[in-house]
Image (tube, rainbow, N blue to C red):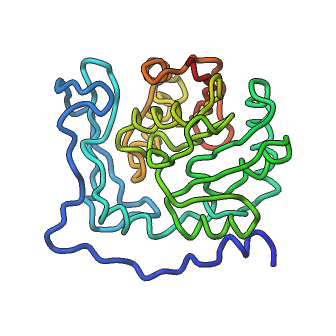
Amino acid sequence: MDLLSLGKMGFAQPKPQLSSSAKPRILYESCPLCSSVDTSILRTADCSRHPLYRPVVAPIMTWKRCAHCEHVFTDGYYTTEVAGIIFADTHDNQKPGWEFERQRMTSARMVERIAQHAVNGRWLDVGFGNGSLLFTAAEWGFTPVGIDLRQSSVEAIARMGIEASCCDIATLDQVNTFSVITMADVLEHMPFPKTGLQAAHRLLHSKGILFLSMPHFDCPAWRLLDLANANPYWGELEHFHNFSLQRLRSLLFEAGFEFLSYGVSERYRICMEVIARRMS
């Protein structure tokens, strides 16, 4: 059986139904980064054509901006019940083993950049998706470890010989254990990103390396897509945040990280890559 077949095993599950009393989103009472209440509606967008869309949520998303720190975020995040319905399915490109040879080339360029700052040790990939980053990190001599919120993905990658757990990074109890933590296209999915960064700081050893990638809200390419009314991220059902590089850098500093480098991501459209080091 090949890797992709292994990755597909166990994904067919009954889809849960939303109870009549459930609310789709928990509304933010303030900015999820700086806690300022001085926020306003920036725009709305249609998310009904997203592959994971389910009518348990409204087809129109609302985006807000914080007047204090200028962060852009959705008006709320999903309840556990609604998240379970929306994420019961998985994109093909997020299944362990998907296009592993082609993904190996993209991941190799990412690992090569990170390996300039860390040469060995345990490498934790948060939300490992198709697993390519972990497979490739192992080629550089790192010990790969993955966590993901999809149990089926955890079981699939474990069958491929990778240590993996189904958990949130905030609950992982392995203090000062990892040389590298990668959060590739993960932070924008977290209702409260600062909690994720604080957990990464706790789990990394002194001078450990953190790698992040995500859409870059404040760049010319983003604005060009906006002008063409062709920006896919406003209707991105899975995202709660749009980060600018400036706001990300300040958030990293607040969480105890030193910014090291910036790069353009090859994984997804209009995305950036940032490498940072734990300061203490």
Find the residue positioned furthest to the left: 21
Pick the residue in front: 151 or 108.
Answer: 151
Pick the residue in front: 154 or 191.
Answer: 154
Q: Is residue 255 above or below residue 239?
A: above
**Considering the image in quadrants, where does the N terminus appear?**
bottom right
Identify the residue shown where x is 28% and y is 28%: 65
Identify the residue shown where x is 58% and y is 17%: 259
Q: Is residue 151 above or below residue 171?
A: below
**Considering the image in quadrants, where does the C terminus appear?**
top right
Picture coordinates of residue 279 (x, y %)? 57, 17
Quadrant of residue 54 within the rendered picture: bottom left
Q: Relative to 89, is 179 on the left or the right?
A: right
Q: Is residue 8 above or below residue 43?
A: below
Picture coordinates of residue 179 (x, y %)? 69, 34
Identify the residue shown where x is 72% and y is 59%: 162
Identify the residue shown where x is 34% and y is 31%: 72
Picture coordinates of residue 177 (x, y %)? 63, 39
Counting the numbered discs, the total is 0
Picture coordinates of residue 245 (x, y %)? 50, 22
